[in-house]
Amino acid sequence: MIKFLKDFWGAQDTLERKMFWSILVVVTVVATCSAIFTIYEGLNFSASLASLGCALLCFIIAFVAVRTSLYNQCYLVMCCALSCFLMPMLFLFCGGITSGMPLYCITSLALIAFAVRGRAKNISFTISLLIQTAIIYLSWKNPDMLYTTLDRDGAFLDILVTHILTGITLFAVGSFSLMSYVQEREKSEKLVARLDYLAVRDSLTGLYNRRYLLKFLEETVWKHRNDYFIAMFDLDNFKQINNKYGHTFGDTVICTVGKLIQKSEDETTGEIVTRFGCEKFIYLINAGSEVEAYAKVESIRKAVRQITFEEHPELQLTISGGLLPCNSKSASDVKQLLFRVDELVVSAKNQGKNQIRNMVEN
C-alpha cells in the first residue's frame, strides 16, 4: 500500500496535481472526522449526513479526476460545493455561530484562494463569501433557522475540535503544497541546468560545442592569444568507416577519439577541447612555445593509432591535424584563425594523412 501511494504521488508530475491530491485527501479526512464527531455529540442526523456527503463528494471528485485528468475543474467543483452548499448547510445543522462552523467556512474560502486560479478564483470566492455571510447574518437575525443549538459545554467542545481539525487542514495543505513547490522547483532547476549544459556541450561526446568554442575564442583566447595555440583534428577516412561499419559504430569512434583528446586537456590553464564538426575536433592549447604545443598534438596523433575496438580489431584509426599559434599574423580575427588552421588540416590530408601540419612546415 505504501509503495502504491509513493508511486502514485511520484506520478503526479506537476505542482497543481500534487496540490489537488493533498488538499482532496485532507478535506476527505477532515469531513469524515467531522461526521464521526457530530454523531458523538448527538447532533441532528442531517449534520452527520452532510459531513459524510462532503467526504463522498471528495471520493467522486477523485474518481472523476483520475478518469478525466481535469484536475483544475474538479478542484473548482469541490471548492464551490464546499463553500456554497455544504458549509452553509452544516452551519445550519451544527449549531451556527455558537459552533466551530465559522472556522470551517473560513477554511473553505482559504482553499479557494489558495489553489483556484484566474477569473474562476475571484468569481467562486465572491459567491461563496456572499452566501456564507448571508447565512450567518440570517441565522443571527432569526435563530429559529438553526436546526441545532449547542449549550455552553457543547459549543466549547465543538469549537475546540473545529480548531484542531482546521489547524490540521491548513497545516497539512500548507506542508504538502510547500513540499510540492520545493520538488517542482528542484525539477525546474535541474531542467535549467540541463539546458545550460546542452547549450554549450555536444550531445554525443559531451565535449564543448562549436557555439561555446566561438564564444571562448572571442572572449578569452583572443585577448590572450600570445599564450594559446589552436589545433584542429580530422579523422581520416571517417566516411568509409560509417559506410562499412554503420553510423552507430561511427558515433562510438567519435566518442572514443573525443575522450582521448580530452585527456590532454588542462582546464587549470584554460585549455578546452571541442567537437567542431562531424569528425572534427579543436583543441585550444595553452603552451609556452610551439614546440611544446606540437609535442602535445603529436602525442594525440600517435595515441589515436593505438585505439582498438574488440568488435572490429582490424580497424586502424588515424587523424590528420593542423597547429597554428593564435597570434599568427596570417589571422586577423577568429574567423580567419579557424580558416587558416583548417587549411593546415587539408594540407595534412593532401600530403598523405596521419600527420600534423603547422605554419612553420608550410
Image: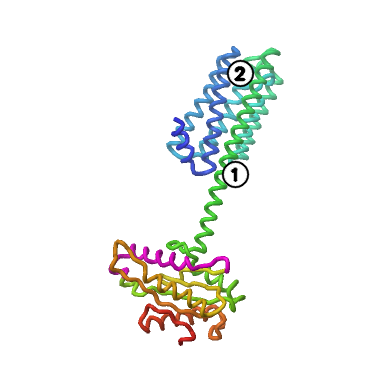
Q: Main secondary structure of the magenta part?
A: helix
Label 1 sits on what residue type?
Answer: Gly
- Residue identifier under label 2: 93
Q: CA distance from mark 1 to mark 2?
A: 33 Å
Q: Could you classify mark 2 by the number of other residues whose Cα lies within 10 Å: few (under 14), some (14-19), or many (20 or more)?
A: many
Magenta span of residues: 241-269
Instruction: From the top left corner, tell me how far across and down residue 62 is, in percent.
Output: 48, 32
Image-based side of 141 in relation to 313, left or right: right
Q: Secondary structure at mark 2?
A: helix
Q: Is residue 327 above or below residue 31?
A: below
Which residue corresponds to the image point at 56% horizontal and 51% vertical from the top-left? 189
Q: Residue 48, can we see it?
A: yes
Quarter residue 261 falls in: bottom left
Q: Nearer the viewer, residue 232 or 79?
A: 232
* Residue assigned mark 1: 118
Q: Which is more N-terminal, label 2 or label 1?
A: 2
Q: In the displayed structure, would residue 258 be above or below residue 48?
A: below
The image quadrant where one finds the N terminus is top left
At label 2, the amino acid type is Phe
